[in-house]
Image: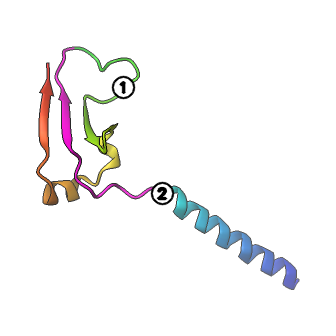
């Protein structure tokens, strides 16, 4: 019976740890630029958003950033494209 209890505790601990690792922390760093796409029509094929950030030279979704942190700590250049 001791082995079964030990096994259950081990499984419970590892499943909790796995869940914590799958949740990604939001980025708390200032992106270089915010791009707002105001071109009429739906987003370009493969893109689901009309707003994105340039961060470390790459296009990054706003969902990956801590928006509250950005508002308090960053002055982000905004570029609107038509």
Where residue 46 sits in the image (x, y, percent)? 41, 22
* Quadrant of the frame with the C terminus: top left
- Whichever of callouts 1 and 2 sits on the residue coming sooner in the sequence is 2
Q: Secondary structure at mark 1?
A: loop
- Circles 1 and 2: CB distance less than 8 Å? no
Residue 69 higher or lower than 45, as above or below: below
Residue found 76% across the figure and 74% down from its top: 8
User: Which quarter of the picture shows residue 55?
Assistant: top left
Magenta-tinted stretch: 24-40
Please tell me which residue lies in front, 13 or 61: 61
Q: Which residue is mark 2?
A: 23
The kind of secondary structure the magenta stretch mainly shows is: loop
Q: Secondary structure at mark 2?
A: loop
Where residue 42 sits in the image (x, y, percent)? 28, 17
Q: What is the C-alpha distance between the residues marked 1 and 2?
A: 23 Å
Colouring convention used in this rendered image of the protein: rainbow
Q: Is residue 14 left or right of residue 34?
A: right
Residue 49 higher or lower than 73, as above or below: above
Q: Which residue is mark 1?
A: 47
């Amino acid at each position: 019976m001791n082995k079964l209890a030990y096994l259950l505790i081990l499984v419970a601990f590892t499943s909790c740890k796995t869940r914590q690792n799958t949740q990604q922390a939001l980025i708390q760093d200032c992106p270089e630029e915010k791009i707002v796409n105001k071109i009429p029509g739906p987003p370009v094929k493969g893109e689901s958003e009309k707003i994105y950030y340039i961060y470390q030279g790459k296009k990054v979704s706003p969902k990956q950033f801590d928006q509250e942190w950005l508002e308090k700590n960053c002055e982000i250049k905004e570029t609107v494209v038509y």
